[in-house]
Image: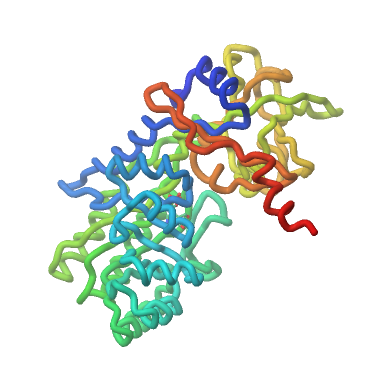
Amino acid sequence: MKPRIVDDATLRALAERFGTPLFVYDAATITARAAELLEARDAGRGFDVVRYAQKANPNLSLARLLLQRGCALDAVSSGELRRALALACDPRDVSYCADLFDDDALQLVTRHPFQLVAGSPDMLERYAAAAPPRRDIALRINPGFGHGHDAKVATGGEQSKHGIWHAELARVVDRARELGLRVTGLHVHIGSGSDLEHLARASAAVVEAAEVVRDSLEMLSCGGGLPIPYRDSEVRFDVPRFLAHWNRARMRIEERVGRALRLEVEPGRFLVAEAGLLLARVLGTKRSAKSAFVFLDAGFHNLLRPALYGAYHKLSLVGRDAEPREPQVVAGPLCESADVFTQEKHGRIVARELPRARAGDLCCIHDTGAYAAAMASGYNSQLLAAEVMLHNGRARLVRARQTIDQLLRPELECLE
Ligand SMILES: Cc1ncc(COP(=O)(O)O)c(C=O)c1O
């Protein structure tokens, strides 16, 4: 079983001080995951750049912590580029990986020397026409297959909107040359929450693709997609074996191109998911003929993954681990049937073995550092939760709870 990131006494104190629902992040866990990637070595070589995919959790304090630990940043939108600028990052160290430009993103990459990772041929036309400060670009390829923890997060294959189709690559590289752009990088990201087998297959696909850009290639990016164990029964991802696959790919390409290549990795989930928990208050319970329901003050407006993917998150009741368990369905407060944390794929509601919950209990939803606060909404006019970060046991607010005034003001100002 994984060690708890926060003890029960601290959780009670945090709920008292900051209220619930509350996201709690542990800086030490984030630091440990970053070190695991930064320090990984295979045949003496490691990842040259560990690039944090901000989309997993864009909180500025969390991103700054990863920058301080030696990571760089990836952005997938103009908002994330602006977050990197707000953190005073050198734009040359920040990548913009997308399949399109909106006007703001195009303006930003033409004003600052961000590293462009283009996922559509169309982006090259717009980029070159905008006279950017950088002419070297990377291309994101779609290797013909994708894989993730759910079909909704696979980002490769014929039906995926992401990346440049592998058979189109040579034509796109030719067009880049005509436009005066140098393709110095190849990037592949097949999906989120993948596994070693598929991530290794992606490395083989890049070896093939590299032939087309052998004259100018300087960098390979393995993308993200590194999984974490959400269930106690799941094993940890084998970082050294993952690196070994990619090092083999890198070395095969290096032999052909005759120069050393930089290897980048671009995880989101792996760096932050296990560092977070969502702390919620039990508001009430009820029974039907078949089920016992537990209602929390957190719902899918805080954590969408169970409703969207049928994703599993471990649950626990603070201070009650030793008590006997019984099956309970754990739900949120929203007026929506999908607002249930204990559900599987296709909305199949299931019960979870937990101590019998009572109103006032505190409930932890574990491994919610990634794709939780990042995907939050204001559905049912719920307010965005507060977020705190723990540094050596001391809690610091890293996002204040949204207020009802912040929710209503933009509309009140528009009322006639
Ligand atoms: C381009 C890109 N890079 C990196 C990531 C991070 O993925 P993960 O959080 O699974 O590591 C994503 C997410 O799907 C992505 O779209």
Residue 222 lies in what quarter of the image?
bottom left
| 370 lies left or right of 206 | right
Residue in view at x 27 percent, y 76 percent: 182
**x, y (%) of residue 47?**
25, 50
Rendered position, 233 above or below 361:
below
Residue 15 lies in what quarter of the image?
top right
Q: Quadrant of ligand 1?
A: bottom left
Q: Nearer the viewer, residue 17 or 298?
A: 17
Residue 314 lies in what quarter of the image?
top right
> Which residue reaches farthest right?
289
Residue in view at x 61 percent, y 48 percent: 309
| 301 lies left or right of 136 | right
Q: Is residue 260 visible?
A: yes
**x, y (%) of residue 169?**
37, 77
Rendered position, 73 above or below 15:
below
Q: Nearer the viewer, residue 371 or 355?
A: 371
Q: Is residue 233 visible?
A: no
**Number of marks drawn:** 0
Q: How is the image coloured?
A: rainbow
Q: Nearer the viewer, residue 386 or 333?
A: 386
**Quarter in which the C terminus is drawn:** bottom right
| 41 lies left or right of 391 | left
**x, y (%) of residue 206?**
32, 65
Residue in view at x 63 percent, y 42 percent: 306
Q: Nearer the viewer, residue 125 or 220?
A: 125
Rendered position, 303 above or below 20:
below
| 236 lies left or right of 277 | left
> Which residue reaches farthest left?
258
Residue in view at x 16 percent, y 47 percent: 43
**x, y (%) of residue 226?**
41, 47
